[in-house]
Amino acid sequence: MSKPKVAFFDFACCEGCQLQVANIGEPLIDVLDIVQVVEFREVMSEKWDGEFDVAFVEGSITDEHAVERVKKIRERSKILVALGSCATIGGVNGMKNSFQLEEVGKYVYGESYKFFPTIHTKAVHQVVKVDYFVNGCPIYQSEFLTVLKCILQGIPYYVPEYPVCVECKLNENVCMYDRGLTCMGPVTKAGCNSWCINNGNICYGCRGLTINPNTEGFKEVLKKYNIPEDFLMKKIEMYNKCKELDRS
């Protein structure tokens, strides 16, 4: 029985999520026992011209060339997975959508901006059908392995729809607000085991908002600690700006 053929592709991103995969370590040996990686620019030069059983796509879609390319990858793939924040929710690249595209082009390329046409940043699912999502910036390696197991078993993977605060409390962390810091944990979907907070950082909301975020409760937290709502709204947009396209 042949191994499932797996490939990794990148669009507008830092490719840090693919590096997370390459750096998984010993468990990666077990993965390679059950799948055949046929294309992965970060770690190999070989290309594959056939179909893919599973294609992992990192990065957001920011120009028409990327739109056509991701559509072709989708056509060749039995299962397509959005890998990391840029692919799943648009990520930091989505901040471009707050400005006029011509303005952004001139700021980056000067008078040569017309040679670099662009479009509003989109998450992968806003262009093609996505079968699985691996959230985070970068991805949480344990979650990646869990999602891969679900794919190979042909079962769905359900991203937790409770906030990061739940995992944070289970890990017995001191709340960042009690430490005088702001944090997106109250409205960000869990699944990362509160990775950033465990290591002394705040939650930036890189996994995307929960389906029904407790915004009123979040506002009460902000009020309690005298934090302006506008300040946190800007932080939400840092990763989640592309969500507006889903509502249009």
Image (cartoon, rainbow, N blue to C red):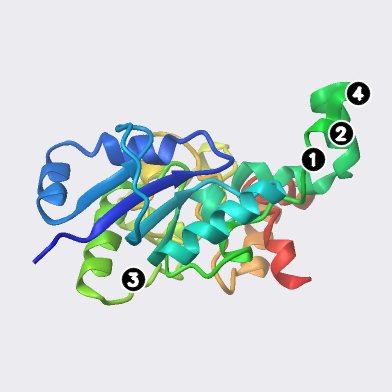
Residue picked out by circle 4: 111
Asked if the residue at tag 3 contacts the one at tag 2, i.e. Cβ–Cβ closer than 8 Å, the answer is no
Counting residues from the start of the chain, the first of labels 3 and 1 encountered is 1
Residue picked out by circle 2: 114
- Of badges 4 and 3, nearer the viewer stands 4
- Give x and y (percent) for residue 130: 48, 67
Counting residues from the start of the chain, the first of labels 1 and 4 encountered is 4
Furthest-front residue in this view: 49
Query: SS of the residue at dot 1?
Result: loop
Q: Is residue 21 above or below residue 75?
A: above
In the foreground, 31 or 41 = 41
| 179 horizontally vs 144: left or right | right
- Split into 4 quadrants, where in the image is the N terminus? bottom left
Query: SS of the residue at dot 4?
Result: helix
Asked if the residue at tag 2 contacts the one at tag 1, i.e. Cβ–Cβ closer than 8 Å, the answer is yes
Asked if the residue at tag 3 contacts the one at tag 4, i.e. Cβ–Cβ closer than 8 Å, the answer is no
- Split into 4 quadrants, where in the image is the C terminus? bottom right
Marks 1/2: CA–CA distance = 6 Å
Whether residue 20 is visible = yes
| 183 horizontally vs 29: left or right | right
Task: Rate crowding at label 4 as few (under 14), some (14 to 19) or many (20 or more) other CA atoms within 10 Å.
Answer: few
Marks 1/4: CA–CA distance = 12 Å
Whether residue 225 is visible = no
- The amino acid sitting under disc 2 is Lys
Query: SS of the residue at dot 2?
Result: helix
- The amino acid sitting under disc 1 is Pro
- Of badges 2 and 3, nearer the viewer stands 2
Query: SS of the residue at dot 3?
Result: loop
Residue picked out by circle 3: 157
Task: Rate crowding at label 2 as few (under 14), some (14 to 19) or many (20 or more) other CA atoms within 10 Å.
Answer: few
Task: Rate crowding at label 3 as few (under 14), some (14 to 19) or many (20 or more) other CA atoms within 10 Å.
Answer: some
**Of the numbered discs in the image, which one, if any, rests on residue 117?**
1
